[in-house]
Image (cartoon, rainbow, N blue to C red):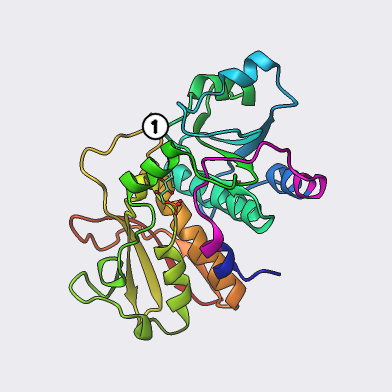
Amino acid sequence: MTPISEVIRRRCSCRSYADRPLEEDALHHFTRAVHAPQRGPFGHTPRFSLLSITSLSRDDWKKLGTYGVIKNARLYMAGMIRPAPMAACDFGFCMEKLILEATKLGLGTCWLGGTFSIGAFANAAGLCKEEQLPAVTPVGYPADRRSLTERTMRRFAGSNRRKPWPELFFQDNLFMPLLSDEAGPYAEALENVRLAPSASNKQPWRVVYDKKLQIFSFYISRAFGYRQLREISLQDIDMGIAMCHFDLTVNEMGLKGSWLREDAPATIKPLEYMASWQAGD
Ligand SMILES: Cc1cc2nc3c(=O)[nH]c(=O)nc-3n(C[C@H](O)[C@H](O)[C@H](O)COP(=O)(O)O)c2cc1C
């Protein structure tokens, strides 16, 4: 089994695909994962649907627009959820798990929260009235070369860069950066948070470690004026993705703990509290 840290390092947004279908084995494994019931740490249950070039009419397939961003995809996964508090976070958590499953199978993916035609995807995926469709991803084998659009987008978003530890992780308050050595066995889980993908690569997660209580509190640094996508905010999805990386890593390492949302968490302005992970059985 490939260690989760290696899978997380291997994943990167792929926007140019080889013009060939998934091998049968990979398709079988991925389909099974996508259709399994999903539940995030806060109890919300997003659902996912696969849209394939062979299962849609030519016309319907052509309508699945990505504004020229994605080249040659033959398969998409669309994610749907009923809006509610913490639902976006659960959505990001569950969808990232599937994205990493695809990565394990050698498949390329790319979170799309903005550059896709929602109406066409909603029709094809059978979106219900009370649901939202916040994101989709193409799934397929990466092409040998990235398209010019893709190279430009990566440069524009600074996709290869991640913020350093002192900007993201803290001890007790926001004035004391947490060093990797001081995070003990949790250093790898935090490093995997740092490497997570985020909309426009904004990396909005901040984590404060209370060593005495063994609690990691996750805060969001909201980008000013960042577009709210209908009722679902892309940055809440980013938080779910980061929590997924943390969760998969501590689980693999056998570090026990659980997610909770404190009723009256300490506000650390200008950050907004999202959730905490507390060590223990
Ligand atoms: C919630 C979310 C929404 C995103 N939306 C888009 C999008 O609409 N179009 C796009 O090309 N990339 C999109 N991305 C991909 C990010 O730009 C990418 O993850 C980031 O630049 C880091 O690059 P990497 O994924 O290669 O590590 C999105 C990523 C996330 C997590």
Residue 29 falls left or right of residue 161? right
- Quadrant location of residue 126? top right
- Quadrant location of residue 60? top right
The residue identified by callout 1 is 231
The answer to if 16 sits in the magenta stretch is yes
In the image, residue 36 above or below residue 254: above
Residue 151 falls left or right of residue 6? left
* Residue 177 position in % (x across, y down): 25, 75
Residue 200 falls left or right of residue 76? left
Tell me what residue is drawn at x 37 percent, y 39 percent.
233
Range of magenta residues: 8-28
Q: Residue 254 versus residue 64: which sits nearer the camera? A: 64
Where the C terminus falls, by quadrant?
A: bottom right
The single residue placed furthest to the right in the displayed view is 24
Tell me what residue is drawn at x 42 percent, y 42 percent.
85
* Residue 142 position in % (x across, y down): 60, 46
Dominant SS in magenta: loop
Where the N terminus falls, by quadrant?
A: bottom right
Residue 74 falls left or right of residue 149? right
Q: What's under tag 1, amino acid-wise? A: Glu
Q: Residue 26 versus residue 150: which sits nearer the camera? A: 150
* Residue 168 position in % (x across, y down): 30, 66
Q: Quadrant of ligand 1?
A: top left
In the image, residue 156 above or below residue 11: above
In the image, residue 119 above or below residue 162: above
Q: Residue 28 versus residue 207: which sits nearer the camera? A: 28
Quick check: can you spot residue 207?
yes
Quick check: can you spot residue 39?
no
SS at circle 1: loop
- Quadrant location of residue 78? top right
